[in-house]
Image (cartoon, coloured by chain):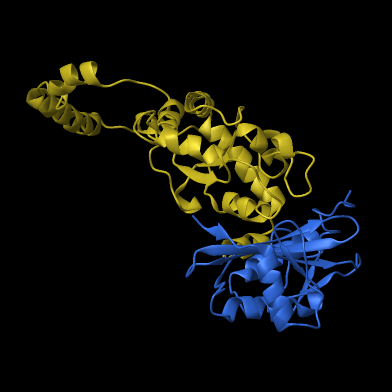
Chain colours: A blue, B yellow
C-alpha cells in the first residue's frame, strides 16, 4: 500500500530549501505558487528520500475564484505519495509552467487540462487541443461554460 | 399487245422436282428417332432443382453472409463482443467474420457514443465500404445521443451522419436484442429487389457525380 507522506513535514523541508517562496498547505496537499512550481517539483523528484519519479495524475479544478492544478506524485522507490497543488487567479489566461521536462507522462494530461479547462502550460512542447478540435469555442469544464 | 406465254417444258419441272423428292426420300429413309441426351437427368432434376427468381437467390446469398465492420466506440462494444462469442454466436447467421477493414464489409455496426472528434473517421469508414452496405445503430447513444445528447462533444444520433437501416435500443442492448436486430436486417435484405436497386443507384450516381469527381473519388 502506498503511504501518503505527512504534508507538514514535507512543507517544512521544502520551505528550508526555498526560503523565498510562500509554501502553504491544506489538509493533505502542498500548495506552491506557479512561479516556483517547477523548482519545487524538480526538488521533490531528485532529492534522495523523496524520489517522486512518477506522476500518477495531473488535473485541474475550477473554484470560480481561481484555478487549481493538482499533481499526484508517487515514488516507486519508497512507495509513498504526495499531492502537490498550484493556484492561478487569472481567469483570462491562467498560466502554469509545464512539467513535461520532469515527467514525460504529463504531456497528454497537460494537453487535456488545456483542452477542457483552458490552462496554458508554458514550456509545453505541443500544447494543442486533445479531445476537441481546433477552433472549439470556450473550455467546457469551466464553471462559466454554457 | 401480245402476252408472251411462258414456256415451261415438262421435262424441266420433272427434273427439279425429282431432285427435291429424292432428297426428301433419302432423309425420310435415314430418319430415326434421336434420343434426348439429357434424358437420364430427368429424375435427378425433378428431385434436386428448384426454380425461383434471381432476386430471391441473390438476396438469400447476401443476407446469409453479411460481414460487419465493428465500430466498437463505447461500452456497447462489449455486448457486441459477447454476441460474437460462443454463447450467443453470430456464426449461426454467417456473420462471424468481423472485418477490421471496411473494404471487405457489408454492415457498419455502430456500437456506442459517437463524439464529434470521431465523426469524420466514421463517415470515412462508411464511404470506404463497398456497395451494397447497411448500417445498424446499437444502443441509445448511437440512436439519439442518449444521455449525452445535450453535450458539447457528442453527435446526437448516428443518423446525422449515415443512413441507418436498423435501430437496436437499449443501454446497452442485450446480445439477444442485437440478434433480433440482425434478424430484422436479414429480413430487410431478403426483401430487396436487386435489379431495381441497382438501376436506382446508377441513376443516383449519374446525377451526383460528374466523371471528374468520380475519378477523383476513385483515387482517394
Q: Residue at x 70, y 65 (%)?
A: A8
Left or right placement of residue A30 versus residue A93 in this view: left
Instruction: Say which of A29 and A17 sits in front.
Output: A17
Q: How many marks?
A: 0
Left or right placement of residue A19 versus residue B13 in this view: right
Q: Quadrant of residue B33?
A: top left
Q: Is residue A13 above or below residue B172?
A: below
Where in the figure is residue A43, as x and y percent of width and height?
A: 64, 80
Where in the figure is residue B64, as x and y percent of width and height?
A: 40, 31
Q: Quadrant of the N terminus of chain B?
A: top right
Whether residue A111 can be seen here: yes
Q: Residue at x 57, y 62 (%)?
A: B218
Q: Is residue A126 above or below residue A61?
A: below
Q: Residue at x 9, y 22 (%)?
A: B32
Q: Is residue A138 above or below residue B152?
A: below
Instruction: Say which of B214 and B43 sits in front.
Output: B214
Q: Quadrant of the C terminus of chain B?
A: bottom right
Q: Residue at x 58, y 46 (%)?
A: B73
Q: Is residue B30 above or below residue A117?
A: above
Where in the figure is residue A72, as x and y percent of width and height?
A: 64, 62
Where in the figure is residue B204, as x and y percent of width and height?
A: 67, 44
Q: Quadrant of residue A62?
A: bottom right
Q: Quadrant of residue A121?
A: bottom right
Whether residue A124 can be seen here: no
Instruction: Say which of A70 and A107 sits in front.
Output: A70
Instruction: Say which of A140 and B149 sits in front.
Output: A140
Amino acid at each position: 500500500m502506498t503511504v501518503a507522506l505527512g504534508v507538514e513535514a514535507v512543507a517544512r523541508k521544502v520551505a528550508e530549501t526555498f526560503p523565498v517562496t510562500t509554501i502553504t498547505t491544506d489538509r493533505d496537499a502542498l500548495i506552491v505558487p506557479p512561479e516556483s512550481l517547477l523548482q519545487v517539483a524538480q526538488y521533490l523528484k531528485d532529492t534522495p528520500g523523496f524520489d517522486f519519479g512518477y506522476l500518477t495524475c495531473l488535473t485541474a479544478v475550477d473554484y470560480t475564484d481561481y484555478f487549481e492544478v493538482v499533481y499526484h506524485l508517487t515514488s516507486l522507490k519508497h512507495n509513498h505519495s504526495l499531492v502537490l497543488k498550484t493556484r492561478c487567479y487569472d481567469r483570462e489566461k491562467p498560466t502554469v509552467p509545464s512539467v513535461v521536462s520532469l515527467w514525460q507522462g504529463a504531456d497528454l494530461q497537460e494537453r487535456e487540462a488545456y483542452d477542457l479547462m483552458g490552462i496554458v502550460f508554458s514550456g509545453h512542447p505541443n500544447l494543442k487541443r486533445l479531445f476537441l478540435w481546433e477552433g472549439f469555442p470556450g473550455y467546457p469544464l469551466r464553471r462559466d461554460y454554457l | 399487245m401480245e402476252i408472251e406465254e411462258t414456256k415451261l417444258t415438262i421435262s424441266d419441272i420433272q427434273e427439279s422436282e425429282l431432285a427435291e423428292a429424292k432428297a426428301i426420300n433419302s432423309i425420310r429413309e435415314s430418319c430415326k428417332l434421336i434420343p434426348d441426351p439429357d434424358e437420364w437427368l430427368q429424375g435427378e432434376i425433378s428431385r434436386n432443382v428448384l426454380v425461383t427468381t434471381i432476386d430471391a437467390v441473390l438476396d438469400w446469398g447476401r443476407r446469409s453472409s453479411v460481414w460487419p465492420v465493428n465500430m466498437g466506440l463505447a461500452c456497447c462494444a462489449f455486448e457486441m463482443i459477447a454476441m460474437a462469442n460462443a454463447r450467443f454466436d453470430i456464426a449461426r447467421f454467417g456473420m462471424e467474420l468481423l472485418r477490421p477493414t471496411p473494404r471487405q464489409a457489408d454492415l457498419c455496426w455502430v456500437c456506442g457514443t459517437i463524439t464529434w472528434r470521431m465523426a469524420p473517421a466514421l463517415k470515412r469508414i462508411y464511404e470506404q465500404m463497398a456497395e451494397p452496405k447497411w448500417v445498424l445503430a446499437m444502443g441509445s447513444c448511437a440512436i439519439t445521443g442518449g444521455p449525452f445528447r445535450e453535450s458539447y462533444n457528442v453527435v446526437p444520433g448516428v443518423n446525422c451522419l449515415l443512413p441507418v437501416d436498423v435501430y437496436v435500443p437499449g443501454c446497452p442492448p442485450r446480445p439477444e436484442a442485437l440478434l433480433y436486430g440482425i434478424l430484422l436486417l436479414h429480413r430487410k435484405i431478403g426483401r430487396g429487389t436487386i435489379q431495381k436497386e441497382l438501376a436506382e443507384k446508377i441513376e443516383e450516381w449519374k446525377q451526383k457525380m460528374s466523371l471528374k469527381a468520380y475519378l477523383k473519388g476513385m483515387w482517394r
